[in-house]
Image (cartoon, grey):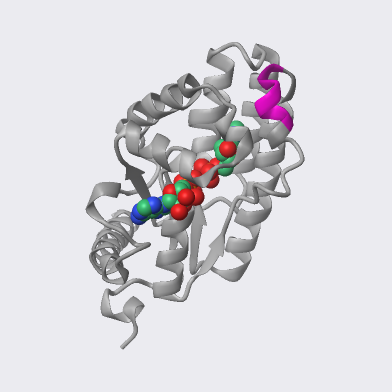
């Protein structure tokens, strides 16, 4: 019996991994996808034509970058929809609007007009059939010091040159955002409780929790359809 069957995880599940920059989303995406033999949907950082420029000048590039990310996520959503699920997604679309666009607007590095245009486009896209909510959002959390350590260890130059206050502001916003998030079921994992890089067995309890959460949420969804 394979891991997906062992933990009762439906073959068409869509699982999205959320959390602040550097917390370990991509690493977790790969570990779960490998274990379940699911497809992955990643943010492509190296080929993003705006990201470097954005870190040099938030005000000038924040709108362009958000539109770019939205277009990329839309293409990925369409792909997931067309395959009929079976995907692990590195970062949710909810974070683009709920964390990044909002933060830049509230900090004054995105204008009110640009923010409204972005929100209107986002809302129109989310209303299309390509945007079913995921079965589960896995939220990765840890201490700010650990997250900062990981950003430094990964060493993307544009992130090293960004003031620590930017990461701290984002970290604090994530805390508040996840406490109020209710678009789909949430499984919270603390990065101190597993190590998928150095201990291959540490993915097993994660898979067990995923199976449990998805079965509960599918039962809950189907009971709502019947009433
Ligand atoms: N369980 C872990 N233990 C130690 N380091 C980790 C772990 N998971 C990820 N990392 C490291 O932390 C850094 C950021 O991880 P990454 O998965 O790229 O984060 P994100 O996708 O959230 O930005 C990378 O250098 C990665 O190797
Ligand atoms: N929507 C976004 N706005 C601004 N910056 C973003 C957005 N989504 C991702 N990013 C940045 C943050 C990181 O520098 C890279 C990749 O994110 P990661 O959390 O490391 O996967 O893109």
For image coordinates 69% across by 49% down, the residue present is 46
For image coordinates 65% across by 20% down, the residue present is 116
- The prevailing secondary structure element of the residues shown in magenta is helix
Q: Is residue 169 left or right of residue 121?
A: left
For image coordinates 41% across by 24% down, the residue present is 168
Q: Quadrant of residue 146?
A: top left
Q: Position of residue 54 (x, y in %)?
A: 69, 28
Q: Position of residue 187 (x, y in %)?
A: 29, 50
When the figure is inspected, residue 93 is found, relative to residue 81, above or below; the finding is above
Q: Nearer the viewer, residue 86 or 188?
A: 188
Q: Quadrant of residue 127?
A: top right
Q: Position of residue 164 (x, y in %)?
A: 47, 23
- Residue stretch in magenta: 53-59
Quadrant containing the C terminus is: bottom left
When the figure is inspected, residue 186 is found, relative to residue 67, above or below; the finding is below
Quadrant containing the N terminus is: bottom left
For image coordinates 55% across by 42% down, the residue present is 155
């Amino acid at each position: 019996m394979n891991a997906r069957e062992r933990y009762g995880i439906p073959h068409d599940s869509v699982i999205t991994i959320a959390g602040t920059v550097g917390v370990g989303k991509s690493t977790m995406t790969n570990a779960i996808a490998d274990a379940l033999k699911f497809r992955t949907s990643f943010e492509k950082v190296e080929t993003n034509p705006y990201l470097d420029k954005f870190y040099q000048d938030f005000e000038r590039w924040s709108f362009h970058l958000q539109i770019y990310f939205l277009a990329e996520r839309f293409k990925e959503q369409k792909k997931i929809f067309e395959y009929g699920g079976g995907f692990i997604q590195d970062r949710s679309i909810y974070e683009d609007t709920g964390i990044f666009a909002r933060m830049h607007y509230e900090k004054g590095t995105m204008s009110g007009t640009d923010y409204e245009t972005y929100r209107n486009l986002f809302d129109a896209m989310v209303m299309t059939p390509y945007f079913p909510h995921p079965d589960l959002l896995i939220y990765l959390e840890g201490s700010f010091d650990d997250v900062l350590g990981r950003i430094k260890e990964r060493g993307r130059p544009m992130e090293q040159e960004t003031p620590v206050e930017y990461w701290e502001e984002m970290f604090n916003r994530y805390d508040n955002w996840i406490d109020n998030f209710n678009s789909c079921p949430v499984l919270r994992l603390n990065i101190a409780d597993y190590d998928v890089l150095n201990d291959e067995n540490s993915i097993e309890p994660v898979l067990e929790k995923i199976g449990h959460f998805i079965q509960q949420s599918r039962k809950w969804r189907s009971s709502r359809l019947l009433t």
